[in-house]
Image: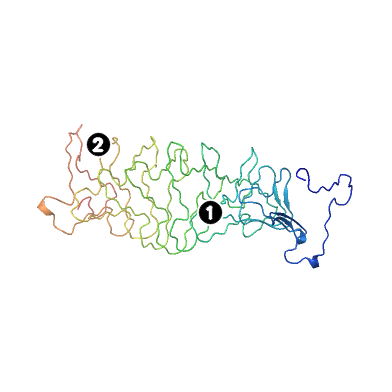
């Protein structure tokens, strides 16, 4: 017949059993055995062989060989392997109760997975069991050689959602991101390339609300004996922004920068190398509060019995600038340029010691030079030098020797 069915098995009245049943003996099923085969032009395109193994030849990659218009494909035990081809689920689920899904796409066969998110449903939804202890990870990616990105996220359009969101609200004992590097690295372990633009376009933005007694926000523990820098900032071009800014306006009880050193030091705790031109190496703009007693700009407290200088200034070459220059032109009436309070309780050292071991060039310089050029507002004693000794008198002691 050229129309209708070639063979029709009408099982509309069958209530139990099978409409068509094929029986065979597994002992007689050898190589090339097929319980049911469909051929096209002499070539098998659909074969059910021993133990229900089914082969669908299909026509070519990209054409439908097996189509489920409704329902699910359930693999209770075993693997689903795509050696050449794709898995496309337009509507429905792929359920694997036991086993894995192995996809090995061929060259030119397109993406191994092409997932289109539908409405509010997740494209991939992983629900882990209560005790997830897989040492290899819930998602295990093993890479060898090559240069392609293992995972690439490319967004098109004005997407405003997060590319990666890690909600660790309840997982207080788990790390959101753990990166372990080893070996002699030829590239950075983590690299960020960005062109930020706008007031809120920060490359990294940390919004933290630490609880009382919380440890460090960023904790860096360095081991080993390497000499590499821990944090390095290199600027190119005429960059005008600050490298590091601490805004402590409201954190009145916090310290902006704290260094703790110990042991017998072989290098300086802080080393600054600079070639200043128009501005100084350190520029402090201080506005102390009125009447802020004890609010020293620099507060140096020295403990112990060491004999090192607290402040040492050494000049090399023919330096012509002043070692210390204090300008008191606009200072208040009761402000002193330099105050030294107290003295030694024993010994024969001086509170102030000025010495020179060489002759002065030109013959006009001295160890101490005092000069006053302004007109005095009223009569005074000791406008240039005032020496007062009010301590208890001792035999052969003098205020000036």
> Residue 71, percent across and down?
74, 44
Viewer-proximal residue, 242 or 319? 242
> Residue 132, percent across and down?
67, 55
Q: How many marks can you see? A: 2
> Residue 318, percent across and down?
18, 53
Q: Secondary structure at mark 2?
A: loop
Occupied quadrant, residue 3: top right
Tell me if mark 2 has few (under 14), some (14-19) or many (20+) residues whose alpha carbon lies within 10 angstroms of its own: few
Tell me if mark 1 has few (under 14), some (14-19) or many (20+) residues whose alpha carbon lies within 10 angstroms of its own: few
Q: Secondary structure at mark 1?
A: loop
For this orientation, the residue located farthest to the front is 1
> Is 307 above or below relative to 68?
below
Viewer-proximal residue, 241 or 390? 241
Taking the image as shown, residue 348 lies to the left or right of residue 89, namely: left
Sequence-first tag of 2 and 1: 1
For this orientation, the residue located farthest to the top is 377
Label disc, if present, on residue 150 of the rendered structure: 1
Residue shown at 76%/62% (left/top)?
A: 50
Viewer-proximal residue, 362 or 235? 235
Taking the image as shown, residue 348 lies to the left or right of residue 171, namely: left
Q: Are marks 2 and 1 in contact (CB under 8 Å)?
A: no
Protein image colouring: rainbow
Label disc, if present, on residue 1 of the rendered structure: none
Front: mark 2 or 1: 1
Q: CA distance from mark 2 to mark 1?
A: 67 Å
Residue shown at 57%/59% (left/top)?
A: 142
Viewer-proximal residue, 311 or 135? 135
Label disc, if present, on residue 329 of the rendered structure: 2
């Amino acid at each position: 017949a050229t129309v209708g069915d070639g063979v029709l098995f009408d099982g509309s009245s069958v209530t139990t059993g099978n409409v068509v049943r094929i029986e065979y003996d597994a002992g007689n099923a050898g190589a090339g055995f097929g319980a049911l085969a469909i051929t096209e032009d002499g070539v098998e395109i659909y074969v059910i062989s021993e133990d229900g193994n089914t082969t669908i030849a299909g026509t070519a990659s990209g054409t439908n060989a097996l189509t489920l218009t409704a329902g699910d494909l359930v693999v209770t035990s075993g693997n689903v392997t795509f050696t050449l081809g794709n898995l496309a689920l337009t509507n429905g689920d792929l359920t694997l109760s036991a086993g894995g899904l192995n996809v090995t796409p061929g060259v030119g066969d397109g993406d191994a997975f092409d997932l289109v998110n539908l409405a509010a449903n997740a494209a991939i939804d992983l629900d882990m069991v209560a005790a997830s202890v897989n040492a290899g990870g819930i998602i295990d990616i093993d890479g060898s050689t090559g240069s392609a990105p293992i995972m690439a996220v490319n967004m098109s359009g004005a997407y405003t959602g997060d590319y990666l969101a890690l909600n660790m609200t309840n997982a207080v004992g788990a790390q959101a991101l753990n990166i372990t590097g080893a070996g002699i690295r030829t590239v950075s372990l983590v690299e960020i390339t960005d062109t930020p633009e706008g007031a809120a376009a920060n490359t990294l933005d940390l919004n933290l609300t630490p609880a009382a007694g919380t440890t460090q926000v960023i904790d860096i523990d360095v081991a080993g004996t390497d000499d590499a820098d821990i944090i390095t900032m290199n600027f190119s071009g005429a960059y005008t922004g600050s490298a590091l800014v601490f805004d402590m306006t409201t954190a009145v009880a916090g310290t902006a920068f704290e260094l703790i050193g110990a042991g017998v030091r072989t290098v300086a705790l802080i080393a600054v190398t600079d070639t200043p031109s128009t501005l100084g190496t350190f520029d402090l703009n201080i506005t102390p509060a009125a009447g802020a007693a004890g609010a020293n700009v620099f507060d140096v407290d020295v403990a112990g019995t060491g004999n090192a200088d607290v402040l040492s200034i050494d000049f090399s070459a023919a330096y012509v600038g002043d070692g210390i220059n204090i300008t008191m032109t606009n200072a208040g009436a009761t402000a002193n340029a330099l105050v030294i309070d107290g003295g030694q309780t024993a010994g024969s050292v001086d509170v102030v010691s000025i010495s020179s071991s060489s002759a002065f060039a030109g013959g006009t310089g001295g160890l101490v030079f005092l000069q006053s050029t302004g007109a005095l507002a009223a009569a005074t004693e000791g406008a240039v030098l005032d020496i007062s000794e009010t301590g208890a008198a001792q035999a052969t002691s003098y205020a000036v020797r």
